[in-house]
Image (cartoon, rainbow, N blue to C red):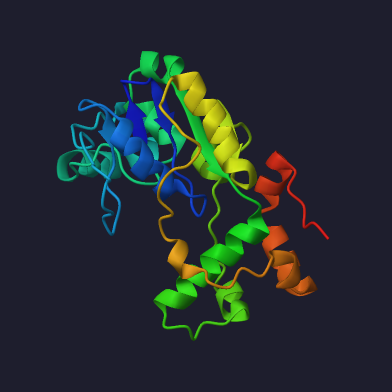
Amino acid sequence: MIISHKYKFIFIKTAKTAGTSIEVFLSKQCGPMDIVTPIAPSIAGHKPRNYQGFINPIPEILERPTRLFSALRQTITSREKFYNHMPASLVQKRVAARVWKAYFKFCVERNPWDKVLSHYHMHAVREGGSLSLDEYLARGRFPINHFRYTDRSGAKIIVDRVLRYENLLAELGEVFSQLDIPFHGTLGVKAKSEYRTDRTPYRMVFNDEQRRIVENAFAREIELHGYRFEP
């Protein structure tokens, strides 16, 4: 997650959408007073900064009074005011209202079947290559993103733009041009791309049952963005 006072934007990092590559690129452009959250494991060229600080628990307590003690505990024990993959609704509570209103807020989303396949390959590699697609799907732990860029109800998108992963460089070029961020058509890094060596299109991988599992899990994202399982 990045908040740039230099360029006046807030980047919300979603899962399996080239977010790490975008963060590495943007961290090099950001100024010394900007907020850049850490990446684990760390990546060369990425420079976290200014993400620690006091957390005012009042906005979160007012919205969810039952979380009084957890909010107070967070204030006392945590030094991370901002963190990786932080949802926009929480960022909104922890920045000044004028910042949230004035800064351009954006993130990236991806076709859910393609996103799931990428997520599966990452876990399969991390688990030594023995994980089957059916075993992965049975776990039900998917890279669902919509809560990261919608309000608490999930009904309303609260960022200014959700870029399409399928057209990423072109859409990033539009955003960076709008923000006056230097960009020459490439991010210069493909973080975590080593996990997926098999580039078979998702259409040729999922059977009907597997397709429906993903469709049900990502129903909200499909509704919001009109994604389809293309033949």
Please state, as top left, top right, bottom left or bottom right, where the C terminus lies in the image.
Answer: bottom right
Q: Is residue 160 left or right of residue 127?
A: right
Query: Is residue 166 or residue 93 the one in the foreground?
Result: 166
The correct choice, above or below, for 166 with respect to 32 in the image is: below
Q: Residue at x 40, y 75 (%)?
A: 126
**Residue 141 in sight here:** no
Image location of residue 199, percent across then percent down: 61, 68
Q: Residue 162's quadrant in the figure?
A: top right
Q: Residue 22's quadrant in the figure?
A: top left
Q: Residue at x 58, y 34 (%)?
A: 171
Q: Residue at x 20, y 33 (%)?
A: 50
**Residue 131 in sight here:** yes
Please state, as top left, top right, bottom left or bottom right, where the N terminus lies in the image.
Answer: top left
Image location of residue 53, percent across then percent down: 18, 33
Q: Residue at x 55, y 62 (%)?
A: 142
Image location of residue 72, percent across then percent down: 23, 39
Query: Is residue 130 or residue 212 the one in the foreground?
Result: 130
